Amino acid sequence: MSEEFDFERIKNKAIEQLKAGKPLLGKDGAFAPLLESILNAALEGEMDAHLSEDERMSGNRRNGKMQKQVQTSMGEVTVSTPRDRNSTFDPQFIKKRETILAEGVADRIIGLYALGNSTREISDWMEENLGNRVSAETISSITDRVLPEIKAWRSRSLDYIYPIVWMDAIHYKVMDERGCAITHAIYNVLAIDKDGRKDLLGMYISKNEGANFWLNVLTDLQNRGVHDILIACV
């Protein structure tokens, strides 16, 4: 049974956020923590690939991390770049002196959360976006690090009840099997929880928006613990 809470207070707080122009998504919104998680996992994957057997035989190994702030279209994120003892690690996902993420990269990275749990899908995305900069072995190592992060986020348990839930979509360009740019929509389910905090509950891809699609979304939320939504905004 859910605990008692002041629904009017939560509703008014959410309305005030919107009136003040504070974004639900986008800069300083709910996406920044997800972006930060992927960036750091990818850097760890690059280091895994860098420390090959030959590198380890030469005595090279991990040697702590260096933190820096990176500006993105979704807000500032903290990146922890791994270091190696021989100082030969040269990351490509986020370069050593890079403090501003290139336009559009953040959107594409966030799209990974909606792709699914397929290793092939994640690897294909990495190859498309990084293939000209890193080896296939590095792509594999990054995928091994990133995929558990995505799986854990997509399957995490949710609250029993949410006072307010928004269902929205963002559109982004992807390359199809013919190499042509096409537009896909990622449908986002964003909530305000009982404490007034924003929480991105899920991200879903569908070529066609319809009743069956939203039924699948709501079924997924229910399977992860949601039993009641007081106000749903679509």
Image (cartoon, rainbow, N blue to C red):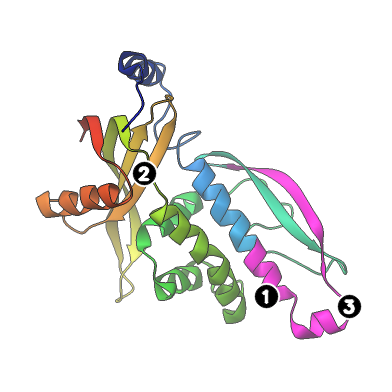
Amino acid residing under circle 2: Leu
Q: Residue at x 34, y 73 (%)?
A: 179
Amino acid found under the numbered disc labelled 3:
Gly
Residue appearing at x 28%, y 34% in the figure: 166
Is residue 68 located in the magenta-colored stretch of the structure?
yes
Q: In the picture provided, is 71 more to the left or to the right than 183? A: right
Q: Is residue 136 left or right of residue 51?
A: left
Local crowd size for mark 3, using a 10 Å CA cut-off: few (<14), some (14–19), many (≥20): few
Label disc, if present, on residue 201 of the rendered structure: 2
Inspect the image, locate mark 1, and give the three-letter code of the amino acid beneath it: Ala
Asked whether disc 3 touches disc 2, contact meaning CB atoms under 8 Å apart, the reply is no
Q: Secondary structure at mark 2?
A: strand
Question: Magenta residues, as a range?
Answer: 44-71
Q: First in sequence: mark 2 or mark 1?
A: 1
Is 91 located above or below residue 214 in the figure? below
- The residue to which callout 3 is attached is 59
Q: Quadrant of residue 13?
A: top left
How many residues crowd around disc 2 within 10 Å: few (fewer than 14), some, or many (20 or more)?
many
Q: Nearer the viewer, residue 217 or 188?
A: 217
Residue 159: image location, x then y, percent: 37, 39
Residue toward you, 214 or 205 = 214
Residue 87's place in the image compared with 208, above or below, is below
